[in-house]
Image (cartoon, rainbow, N blue to C red):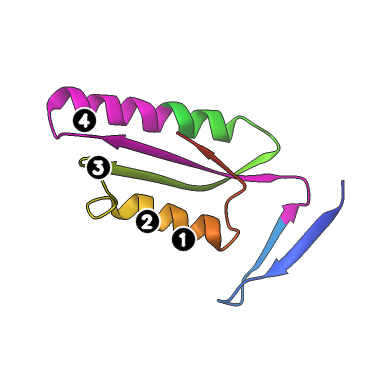
Amino acid sequence: MERRIRKISNGAIQTTESTQLRVAAYYRVSSNTYEQEESLELQIKYYTNLIDNQPDWICAGIFADKDSGRNTKNRPEFVKLMKSCRAKGVDLVLT
């Protein structure tokens, strides 16, 4: 497997395998009820564990919103995720 070393803006050096996927997860709940909060926490735990246990995946971020899904106005984490995707910082999104 070929290794790539990429210099990042703060001067630190990051090493990644060239075949690793940058994987992000996105969750949304529509209200702030106890049940929805618990569901959100379970989703975060599940997908974090899933990403961490795949040897060819790198976590590209965990994004979660707590509001209506009718538009992106109240979904700032979704907007951040889309910006990261457009900047080619994410290869795969789990929802």
Q: What residue type is labelled 1?
A: Lys
**Residue 10 vs residue 29, the one in the foreground:** 29
Does 26 appear above or below 86?
above
The residue depicted at 58 percent of the width and 76 percent of the height is: 9
Are discs 1 and 4 less than 8 Å apart at CB?
no
Position in image of residue 90 (x %, y %): 57, 51
- Which structural element holds mark 3? loop
- Which structural element holds mark 2? helix
Using a 10 Å C-alpha cutoff, classify the residue at mark 4 as few (fewer than 14 neighbours), some (14 to 19) or many (20 or more).
some
Q: How many marks?
A: 4
Alpha-carbon distance for marks 2 and 1?
Answer: 6 Å
Q: What residue type is labelled 4?
A: Glu
Are discs 2 and 1 less than 8 Å apart at CB?
yes
The residue depicted at 25 percent of the width and 42 percent of the height is: 70
Position in image of residue 28 (x %, y %): 31, 37
Quarter that holds the C terminus: top left
Alpha-carbon distance for marks 4 and 3?
Answer: 19 Å
Does 25 appear above or below 50?
below
Using a 10 Å C-alpha cutoff, classify the residue at mark 1 as few (fewer than 14 neighbours), some (14 to 19) or many (20 or more).
few
Camera-near label (4 vs 3) is 3
**Residue tagged by mark 3?**
70
Q: Earlier in the sequence, mark 1 or mark 3?
A: 3
Using a 10 Å C-alpha cutoff, classify the residue at mark 3 as few (fewer than 14 neighbours), some (14 to 19) or many (20 or more).
few
The residue depicted at 28 percent of the width and 44 percent of the height is: 65
Left or right: residue 14 versus residue 33 is right
Alpha-carbon distance for marks 1 and 4?
Answer: 26 Å
**Residue tagged by mark 2?**
79
Q: Which amino acid does label 2 sit on?
A: Val
Q: What residue type is labelled 3?
A: Arg
**Residue tagged by mark 1?**
83
- Which structural element holds mark 1? helix
Camera-near label (1 vs 3) is 3
